[in-house]
Every structure is written in C-alpha cells, then in structure tokens.
Amino acid sequence: MSNNAKPGGEARSGKARTESLQTANLQLSDAQLEAFLHTHGIPERIVQYFDELPEKLVKLGGGGRMRSILDCGGGNGQYLDMLLDHFPQAEGTLVDSAQFMLDQNKSHPRKRLVLENLENMASLIDSGQKFDLICFSDVLHHCIVSTYAGTRALQTTILKNAAKLLAAGGHVVVSERIIDSWITDEFSAKLAYTLTRSKMLANVTRLFGANTAGVGVCFTPRKRFLKLVDDAGLSLVEVVLDEENNFSLKRRIKILIWLLGLGAKSLRHELFLLK
Ligand SMILES: C[S@@+](CC[C@H](N)C(=O)[O-])C[C@H]1O[C@@H](n2cnc3c(N)ncnc32)[C@H](O)[C@@H]1O
C-alpha cells in the first residue's frame, strides 16, 4: 500500500486525481472534494466539545490520555490541526485516500500525513501503532460502494479497523449524518443513497444541494449506526447533537424538501463518543 507519511509534514505534490488511491469505495471528483475544504474553520461547538473531553473522560474513568490522535478521512487537516492545538503533547496522524485533500494540508510539526484507504489501513495496523483518540468527522457516509448492503459492510470494516488501532483506554469520536425515517428504519437512507448515486438525476440532486450528486452518499439511521458500532466491537459512551441551529431560510427550505422527498423524520448531525 502506498504510504505518503512524512513526519511533520506536507503531502507530496503532484497531479491530485491520478495519484489518489483507487479505494474500494466510489471516489468523489476533486471538484466535489473542494466543497469540503471548510473555509469557515471548525465550528465552535466542536472546539468546545474537545475542550471538555479530557475532563469528561477522566470522570468516566477512561484516563483522558491524548498523546496520539488518528484523524480518519481527515481531508485538509483543519480538524486535526485544531486537535493538536488543544493537546500540545499529542502527535497526530491524518489518513485520507485523496491526494488532492492531503495536498491542502498546512505543515504542522506534530502532524503526519498518510495516503491510505480507511477500509485497509494496513500500513498503520502492521506498524503496531495505537491511538488514544481516533476521529471520523463527516467521513463514514462518504465511504460507499455500488450496493447498499456492500456499503454497510464497508463501513463496518472501517470501524473495525479503528477498533484495532485503538490504544487501551482510548476513544473514538464519530461525527455523522443521521437520518431517521417515517416509513421503515432504512427507507430514507436507502432512497438518499439511490438518488445521489444516480448519474441521470445528478443535475437535479445537485440543484438541491447534494455535493455528492452522481457518486452517492450513505447517511445512517440511528439504530443502524449503533449496530455498526456493535458489529465493529466498539460501544457507545455518549451521543450529542452536533448541529448549528441558526440555518438560513434557504437552507431550511432545502432541508425540508429533502425530508419530505425522502420520507424522513429527521436528518441531523450527531457526534458519537465510542470506546
Ligand atoms: C467530507 S470530507 C471530511 C474531511 C474532514 N474529516 C473534515 O471534517 O473536514 C470526507 C473525506 O473523507 C475522505 N475519504 C472518503 N472515503 C475515504 C476512504 N475510503 N479512505 C480514506 N479517506 C476517504 C475524502 O477524501 C475526504 O477528504
């Protein structure tokens, strides 16, 4: 497996698209990835969550050690940079399968970049390194293959890999889009997956704000997410709503259209603390 690790480092430069890994999952184009560059920075509520996390973990008897952090699908590195600022003793590793995203990282003396698939992560697992904190911010729903069942299997494999890489007393933080349906548990998630996968409908889904139009996205019902966690051998410590509540009117209307169209009760961001 190609490994782009560079201690303290920047990703190597080069033609982004051609150098990105061929992952089992379907890849977004560089233009679609550009939408994730977070030009507005990390939301204050997330920064605050990590402010309070070590103390919370100590109270929960977890120790709260933050010496090694793994950011899975870490993209342009803003999230990991924020964590490294919070935890000055910590060394960070960022894994992403898109060279384009690695190339957007700022250099940081305690950050290492690895070009790797989350469904594989062989280079990390083989090295025997373990992590106190493993994060997935807005990543799992982008890990998809060409069938819905295969996608859930892929997501389980990815969480299993995280479990293998977790140090004793360590924790996993997953920020994920949770979709619950009025119809059956998985109805809205499957419909969103099918619609966003469709190349024929890509112009329409893009119009309604789907930046994954033509490639696909796979949001997860709460119940299914907890099953993925269980299947991966992890367990839930807490779940908190991870969402701004001051959406613009335009955004509210788009969300409402998606909810009605998908038969969904809710589509929200939640943050799961796992061990
Ligand atoms: C929405 S971005 C999130 C980036 C970052 N975590 C953040 O919150 O800013 C999703 C990231 O997941 C990466 N990704 C998607 N599938 C992946 C896979 N199978 N292996 C590794 N990275 C993957 C993409 O390249 C992209 O950088």
Image: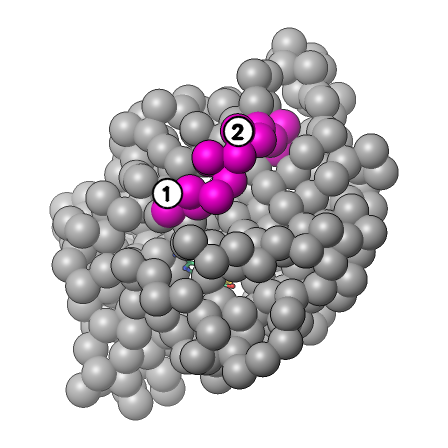
Q: Is mark 1 within 8 Å of ligand 1?
A: yes
Q: Which x, y percent locates residue 7?
A: 72, 51
Indicate the amino acid at tag 1: Ile
Q: Which x, y percent locates residue 32?
A: 45, 79
Segment tinted magenta in the rendering: 120-133
SS class of the residue under badge 2?
A: loop
- Tell me: 81 left or right of 238: right
Decide: is 120 above or below 190: above
Q: Residue 131 appears in which quarter of the rendering?
A: top right
Q: Which x, y percent locates residue 78?
A: 69, 59
Which marked residue is nearer to the observer: mark 2 or mark 1? 2
**Outermost residue, top side:** 61
Decide: is 156 above or below 80: above
Name the one closer to the observer, 47 or 266: 47
The answer, for residue 253, to whether it is visible in the render is: no
Which residue is under mark 1? 158
Indicate the amino acid at tag 2: Gly
Is 271 magenta? The answer is: no
Is 130 magenta? The answer is: yes
Q: Residue 224 appears in which quarter of the rendering?
A: top left
Q: Residues within 10 Å of mark 2 (few under 14, many from 20)?
A: few
Name the one closer to the observer, 202 or 207: 202
Name the one closer to the observer, 108 or 29: 108
SS class of the residue under badge 1?
A: helix
Label drawn at residue 128? 2
Residue at 52% in and 55% down = 3
Decide: is 185 above or below 189: above
Label drawn at residue 268? none
The answer, for residue 110, to whether it is visible in the render is: yes
- Tell me: 149 left or right of 59: left
Q: Earlier in the sequence, mark 2 or mark 1?
A: 2
